Every structure is written in C-alpha cells, then in structure tokens.
Image (cartoon, rainbow, N blue to C red):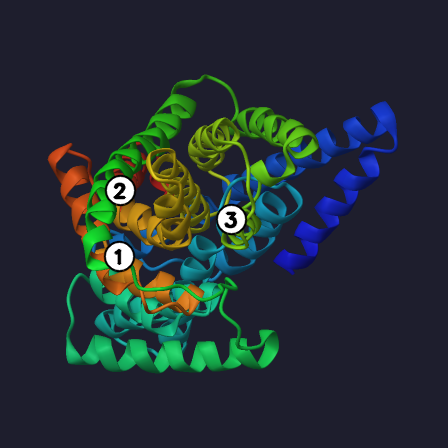
Amino acid sequence: MLIWTEGLRADVVEWSHANGVLGVVAVLALSAGCAVAAVWIVQRVPTAGGSGIQQVEAVQQRQDRAAPWTVIPARFVGGLLSMGLGGMVLGREGPTVHMGAAIGAAAGRLVRATSDEVRVLQTSMAGAGLAVAFNAPIGGALFTFEEVAKQIRLRYAVWTLAAVAAAVVCSRLILGDKPDFSVGGIDNPAPDRLWVFLVFGIVVGGIGVVYSRLVTWFIDLFGRIPVSPMVIGAAVGTVIGILSLTIPNSVGGGDVVAQNLLDGQRLALWTLLGFLALRLVTGPLSYGTGAPGGLFAPMLALGALCGVVGGRLVELVDDSYGASLTPALIIVGMSTLFASVVRVPLTAIVLVMEMTAVTALTIPMILAAVAAVTTASLAGSEPVYDSLRQRMLEGYALDPRKRA
C-alpha cells in the first residue's frame, strides 16, 4: 500500500508539470491536506504520532502502558497519508515497529497473559515489525535486544526470534525475498585505506549529533507555537509539496535516493552538499509535526549522501583513490549515521548488511561506527529515542489524555 500511494503521488506530480497553475495547486493541496489529515488522526489517537519506538521502550521500562489496538489502524492510515501521499521525509519502520508491538500486546490481552508476558510479547513483535520493514530478520532481532530491551535473556531471545521468523516468512511470501537495495560487487578495502573510514566515522558522528538535535529542536519549537498542530502540519506539508515540484527526490523516505547513489549516479559536489543539507533539515522538520512516521529510512538516505560526499572529497585529493572507495563509503555511511543517532552500532551494521546483502565491509563498518558513536557521546548527544521518550513522558505529565 505504501508503494502504491508513493506511486500515486509521483503520478500527480508528473501530471502537474503539464497543467500549469492547476497542477501546482493540486500538488500543494495534496501534500498539505495529507499532512493535516495525518496530524488529525494523531489528535484522535495520540500514541499514533511520530515513530512509536519510544513508546515501546517506555512500556518495556514500565513507564507506560502497552499501546491500545486503535494504534494499528491509526498508524496504518496515518502513515499512508504522511509518507505515501503526503511525501513527508519519514520512514516506514517506526509505524511497523509500533503496529507490531500493538499486535503483540493485543494478543497477550486476548489470551489473558500476565503483564510481564504482555510486555515481552509487545517487545518481541516490535522487532518483527522492524524486520519486515527492511527484510532484515537478524537486524530486527538485534534491535529488540540492543535498543528496546537493552539486554539478551533466553525468553526475549526465543520469543523475538520466533516472532521475527514468522513475520519475515509471511512478508517474503507476499513481497518476495530481495534485499532492499541492489548493490553490485563491492571489494573489501585494502588495510592501508581503513583510516579513511575512521576519519569518515568521526565526521558522520558529528552530522548525527546535528541531526538528533534538529529532531528535538523542531519538536520543541512546534510545541511552543500557539497554533493548532494541524496548522503546523499544513505549513510543513506545503513546504514538502513545493519540494515535490522542484526537487522530487528530496522528499519521501529516501530509498530512491540511496539506490540512485548505489547505482553510481553522478552529481556535482555542490549539488550533493545542498541535497545533504536539505535532507538533514527536512527529516527533522517532518518529524516535528508529530505525523506518523519514523526516522530510520531518512537516516539511511542521509548516510548514503554522506558517503558519496566523502568519496567525492577524497577524489579531490586522489581521483582513483576516491572513486574506488565511494561505493563502500555509501554503504558504510548508512550504518554509521544510524549508529551515531540511535547509538546501536551492532544493529546498524547488521541491518545495513542485510539490506544491501554486502558482507565485505564489516571492518570498515565497525571502525566507522566506533568513531561515530564515540564522537556523539563526547559531544554530549543523547541517543535519539532516549530524548524522544523523555519528551513523551513530559507530555503525559502535562496532558494525561495522551497516555496509552
């Protein structure tokens, strides 16, 4: 459904180019209207807003109740509106994680499971939700252990692996079993070039700090503006509509952006830098509205852009050196930014390996992830979902109706 709605939006944008002012108005109305509708849904089901991963973590830490079943249709429809038709720079994985958790909690309640069993079920199914979003079963399981549960215990391992396996089998029967990204042959970089990935990790770690702070800055900014959230949604939706008309690949989750770069798309360095800066802002801007949608997919695209920019900068020093490293830097950039922002290096590495079916870059990924996580920690940047969970709990204190 998400692919279909994204295609429908692309058709409307293409149609608009041949229909003058009417076409422009149609695209702006579609983007703004879908953003407003998505935010309206969140007003009715508050736990359906944003990523949802922070709510799953709050339940795991006994700070919140498991999400009600109403989250499932709210996130499904709201996500199709915000990400699909609306083109907001958000990812599908947050809603799928939260819907998976809600399904697990609902199943637990149905069979009269204990509160501890319900919590384990919702946590396990959250991992299944991530696994099907990216066709990455091991990455989904690791995310449950490293980020949500923050521990590996036998019960969590067995339930999570069972949930992930069942979910991914069903997903593959429907969608097929292909990696999210198609990648040609990637050679393992020579040992004397590994220092490039260490330096690259430090730089990307800094970009991750900026990204995390922009996410929370926009949330705080929009929370202080004394207007309806739907007005903010309309304004951001209009911005997304303008970008859809002028720079189509600057909107949406960013899978197309990453795939184009992996396919060897060549753009001028200044164009790439502008594109990187644009997506660095539009992702947090979209998330700040509270519309249903996650952070992962936009982060992966941004990481890919960091990689290609890094490769081009190396090319300025040594043309052949940079050209040979660029494909590797694109893939490593995806895992490195993820590790920096979410602070889950193992999940980031395995997830990107599964999404690209590339295993030759294990050492560069590890070096870059360690450098990025260290940089983010030294900069005093909190893991993004810790920050989001804290803001969510503060919101509950101000308005208890938002609680699950």
| Nearer-the-camera pick, 22 or 278 | 278
Residue 201 horizontal side relative to residue 109, left or right: left
Mark 1 element type: helix
Q: CA distance from mark 2 to mark 1?
A: 10 Å
From the viewer's perspective, is residue 160 above or below residue 218?
Answer: below
Residue 323 in the image: state x and y as whole percent.
Answer: 42, 47
**Disc on res. 200:** 2
Q: Amino acid at mark 2?
A: Phe
Compared to residue 201, the image places residue 36 above or below, namely above
Q: Residue at x 45, y 33 (%)?
A: 276
Cα distance in 3D space between marks 3 and 2: 18 Å
Q: Are marks 2 and 1 in contact (CB under 8 Å)?
A: no
**Location of mark 3 (residue):** 261
Of label 1 and label 3, which has the lower sequence position?
Answer: 3
Q: Position of residue 40 (x, y in %)?
A: 57, 38
* Residue contact between numbered discs 1 and 3, judged by CB atoms under 8 Å: no
Q: Residue type at mark 1?
A: Met
How dense is the environment of label 2, judged by Cα within 10 Å: few (below 14), some, or many (20 and up)?
many
Viewer-nearest residue: 133 or 107: 133
The residue shown at (51%, 28%) is 229
The x, y position of residue 57, in whole percent, is 27, 55
**Left or right position of 401 against 1:** left
- At label 3, the amino acid type is Leu
Q: How many marks?
A: 3
On the image, numbered disc 1 is attached to which residue?
Answer: 365
Question: Percent position (x, y) of residue 208?
Answer: 29, 38
Whether residue 277 is visible here, answered yes or no, is yes
- SS at circle 2: helix
Up-down: is 191 above or below 329?
Answer: below
| Label 1 – label 3 distance at C-alpha | 18 Å
Question: Which one is earlier in the sequence, the residue at label 3 or at label 2?
Answer: 2
Residue at image coords 48%, 47%: 293
